[in-house]
Amino acid sequence: VQLVESGGGLVQAGGSLTLSCAASGSIISISAMGWYRQPPGQGRELVARIIGNITHISNSVKGRFTISLDNAKNTVYLQMNSLKSEDTGVYYCTADGNSSELGLFGSWGQGTQVTVSS
């Protein structure tokens, strides 16, 4: 199962970006998808996760970020508004599900850089 992220880049504080992550491969079903991020010099932290119709948003981005899932496309989106410099980091997509080749899987994307200039 491969995850391909897109949409990262450089944006000014207060701006917006939308990240996308498409899962492909021998996927039977996806149970959850989400986004983590790793700020410079820090550990990886959960940003948002969606399991079925249930979403979890980190308190640090609540009210500014929205996660959504297109089940037909096996694609998860992260709409990021009112970006702050502390949102800078590498954003990683994750997916959990069932694959005809792997059985149950948990995959990570390669990461996409988001840089917010103040």
Image (tube, rainbow, N blue to C red):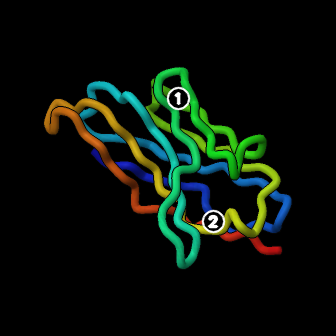
Where is mark 2, residue-wise?
Answer: 114
Where is mark 1, residue-wise?
Answer: 70
Which image quarter holds the N terminus?
Answer: top left
Reply above or below: 44 against 97: below
Left or right: 70 in relation to 18? left
- Residue at 60%, 56% (x, y): give it: 7
- Residue at 57%, 43% (x, y): give it: 48
- Residue 40 locus on image (x, y percent): 57, 76
- Residue 32 locus on image (x, y percent): 42, 33
- Residue at 82%, 58% (x, y): give it: 15
Left or right: 27 in relation to 8? left
- Closer-to-camera residue (25/37): 37
From this viewpoint, which residue is outermost toward the top? 53
Left or right: 62 in relation to 99? right
- Closer-to-camera residue (113/65): 65
- Residue 21 locus on image (x, y percent): 49, 46
The three-letter amino acid code for the residue at tag 2 is Val
- Residue at 36%, 53% (x, y): give it: 108
